Amino acid sequence: MEQKFYDAMSDCPIIAAVKDFEGIQQCLKSDVKIVFVLFGNMCNIGEIVKQIKQADKMALVHIDLIEGLSSHEIAVDYISKNTEADGIISTRMNMINRAKELSLYTIFRIFVLDSRAYQSIEKQKKQIKADFIEILPGVMPKIIQKINKLSSQSVIAGGLISDREDVIDALNAGAISVSTTNQDIWFM
């Protein structure tokens, strides 16, 4: 299942992270192949994903950020049954596990704010069943390298990616891709 995602990242290692309708329109004009949806509610998420899919792009919904959905696994069922989403992003392991059961792509988002967060990743590495790990902020090449050595999942760098140098540094450190809301980077 991961092959389609890897192929899309090979074509374009930049992932558009969209946080509003204007961002959707901009990313549809870009060459990005993968879109992370970071906004919406249970009434409009289906239409948001549909626009992305009609542009022949993959759509992954950050399920924790969708208004009206709970932190219970039934929210993943809702996304699976009521949208054309290819997968989900979540900071919650229960959501990741349910999405895996439903054969959706899964990205476990981790905020690496201090050494305790890194140690937590080390302790949980066997429990993380996601297809990919996204670390935020993504401007820490040394941490990207450490997590790559630690985890069997490929790393996506996200957050605070602001220019070409940040993209190159993250990819050189071993990130398979970078996600960003910075629209200028979508068009690099």
Image (cartoon, rainbow, N blue to C red):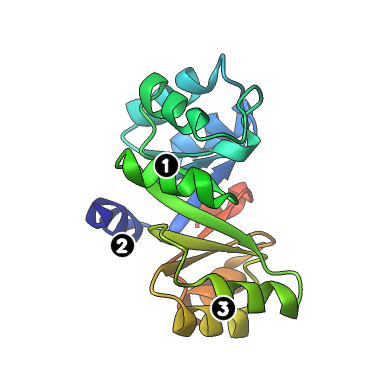
Find disc 1 in the rendering and name its residue.
98
* Residue 32 visible, this angle: no
Q: Separation of disc 1 and disc 2 at Cα?
A: 27 Å
Identify residue type, mark 1. Arg
Q: Residue at x 31, y 34 (%)?
A: 56
Residue 10 image label? 2
Question: Which label sits on residue 122?
Answer: 3
Tell me the residue at 62%/67% (across/down): 138
Q: Earlier in the sequence, mark 2 or mark 3?
A: 2
Q: Is residue 54 left or right of residue 163?
A: left
Q: Amino acid at mark 3?
A: Glu
Residue 72, above or below 136: above
Secondary element at tag 3: helix
Q: Say which residue appears at 36% left-offset and 47% top-offset.
A: 100
Mark 3 or mark 1: whose residue is earlier in sequence: 1
Given contact means CB atoms under 8 Å apart, are the residues at marks 1 and 2 in contact?
no
Image quadrant of residue 54?
Answer: top left
Q: Position of residue 160 (x, y in %)?
A: 69, 61
Do the residues bearing badges 3 and 1 touch, measured as CB atoms within 8 Å?
no
Front tag of 2 and 3: 3
Residue 18 location (% of width, % of height): 58, 39
Q: Where does the image place residue 26, in percent across and percent down from the top left?
A: 54, 35
Amino acid residing under circle 2: Ser
- x%, y% of residue 118? 65, 77
Label 1 neighbour load within 10 Å: few <14, some 14-19, many 20+: some
Residue 128's disc number: none
* Separation (CA) of disc 2 from disc 3: 28 Å
